[in-house]
Image: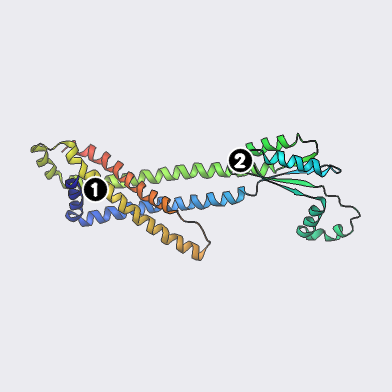
Amino acid sequence: MRLALREALLSFRRAPLLSALSITTIAFALFVVGLFGLVALNLHVALQHVEQRVEIVVYIRHGTPIEAVTTAMSDIQAFPEVDSVTYVSEDQALARARRELTEFQGIFRDLAQNPLPASLEIRLNPGYRDAQHVQAVAERLKGFQFADDVRYGRDWVQKLDRLRDIAGAVGLLIGLAFAAASVIIIGTTIRMTVLQRAGEITIMRLVGATDGFIRFPFLLEGTIKGAIGGAVAVGLNYAAYLVVSSTLFQGDFFTPLEAVAVVGFGMALGLIASAASVGRHTRHL
């Protein structure tokens, strides 16, 4: 292991320009992957904020005893999908309408009787805010005798589901494309190193070195380059994040664990690309 590490580090001294070019290319490839990861992260956070607005409203029939509503609230709160249940009285509904619908102040002022019903506002737990679960809970709520109407904005929830699916599919495809490009770039740089040391590899074979002994330093070299490139990419991503946050909008950055994952992803790409390139080219030397 010590000999392989020494050989891998010596390759940086033997060809510093090529090594610097390799690391720079890897860093920019992973930088683009990281940028897209930041876009996907902030889109996911934005969708979570939108999802928090998903709620089901149960309008209560006039004359329903408050005791029956209180008992039903306890039953609804026990649903695994439900996060909270809020009772809105008729007076609260009218006060809210007067506060939010200022253009109808004249109509509200002339009312002889409150026409707005009491209601239950039900918010769901994360993971249950898609159209399927929302509709299932709404159908269950319609079974309560006091429920005059149940609404949850079906079209809006379905559009949110489609947006979530599209974002996930596009993110996966673009992420795979950039990952493949990174593998090709790293593999090319390792291949250049293998060709540069063709004479040395031939001599090592003549003295009885195994394929594993020959290949391991190259695999280690690719892994190190991937790690350095990943670390540089994280630094560049953070610089881009600071620029965007100070000029456009305040976003979210990777957690420390996610930043380490980016470096680990670079190491994995370096190892995979090195293994593919070395295995293919050392057989011909």
Residue 128: mark: 2
Of the two numbered discs 1 and 2 in the rendering, the one whose residue sits closer to the viewer: 2
Occupied quadrant, residue 283: top left
Compare residues 173 and 225 and report the one nearer the observer: 225
Looking at this view, is 50 or 35 the one in front? 50
Residue located 49% across and 49% down the image: 40
- The quadrant holding residue 107 is bottom right
Q: Is residue 240 left or right of residue 7?
A: right
Q: Is residue 246 above or below residue 5?
A: below
Q: Position of residue 111 (x, y in %)?
A: 89, 56
Q: Are marks 1 and 2 in contact (CB under 8 Å)?
A: no
Three-letter amino acid code of the residue under disc 1: Glu
Q: CA distance from mark 1 to mark 2?
A: 46 Å
Q: Point out the tag, 1 or 2, that comes first from the N-terminus.
A: 2
Q: Which mark is residue 221?
A: 1
From the viewer's perspective, is 255 left or right of 281?
Answer: right
Q: Residue at x 76, y 40 (%)?
A: 71
- Disc 2 residue type? Tyr
Label 2: few (<14), some or many (≥20) within 10 Å? some
